[in-house]
Image (spheres, rainbow, N blue to C red):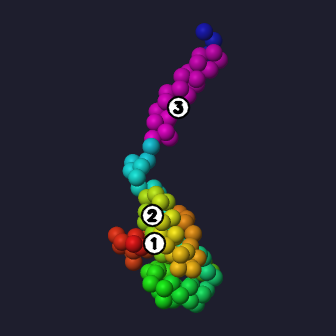
Amino acid sequence: MSAHKLLVVASAAAGLVLGAAASPAVAKPPAHPKSPARPYEAIAGHYPTLAQAQAVAAKAKAKGVRTVIQKNRPGHIEVEYGNGWSTPGPAEALCKKVRAKGLPCEVGQEYHGVPKEWGSSKGR
């Protein structure tokens, strides 16, 4: 066998070995399938100023709805009704109740971490 063919066969074999070793890590399912990396939340929306977010939160409070204001970054302040669910169902159910009170509500996924103010209550 020539040196060139030997090098081609060795390279192909090395690729198969390395590819097989890497495949399980790439295809590995999440450690906790019931705990998504991005939990679900029910929010009023995003507001450019803290004053606007506080006004929305005050309106919700006046109607008996608990809120948490999450300051993600300047100009991107979120008013949350609930957060931390592993599926969208509880967030959708809360939004239905909130909308019935005439307040805005949308379901989304958390990208900035669940605020500590929710603790284990998740807005219920």
Disc 1 or disc 2, which is closer to the eye?
Answer: 2
Give percent across and percent down for residue 31: 39, 48
Q: Number of marks in the image?
A: 3
Q: Which residue is mark 1?
A: 82
Q: Callout 2: helix, strand or loop?
A: helix
Q: Callout 3: helix, strand or loop?
A: helix
Q: Amino acid at mark 1?
A: Gly
At label 2, counting other C-alpha atoms closer than 10 Å, the crowd grade (few under 14, some 14-19, many 20 or more) is many
Q: CB under 8 Å between callouts 1 and 3? A: no
Q: Amino acid at mark 3?
A: Gly
Report the Cα–Cα distance between label 1 and label 2: 9 Å
Report the Cα–Cα distance between label 2 and label 3: 41 Å
Disc 1 or disc 3, which is closer to the eye?
Answer: 1
- Taken as a whole, is the magenta stretch helix, strand or loop? helix
Res 89 visible: yes
Which quadrant of the figure contains the C terminus? Answer: bottom left
Q: Which residue is mark 2?
A: 90
Q: Of callouts 1 and 3, which one flags the residue occurring earlier in the amino acid sequence?
A: 3
- Residue at image coords 48%, 85%: 63
Residue closer to the observer: 86 or 72: 86
Is 3 located above or below residue 29 in the figure? above
Provide the residue span drawn in magenta.
Answer: 4-28
Residue closer to the observer: 1 or 84: 84
Q: Which residue is mark 3?
A: 19
The single residue placed furthest to the front in the displayed view is: 100
Q: CB under 8 Å between callouts 1 and 2? A: yes
Give percent across and percent down for residue 33: 42, 49
Q: Of callouts 2 and 3, which one flags the residue occurring earlier in the amino acid sequence?
A: 3
Res 38 visible: no
Give percent across and percent down for residue 111: 53, 65
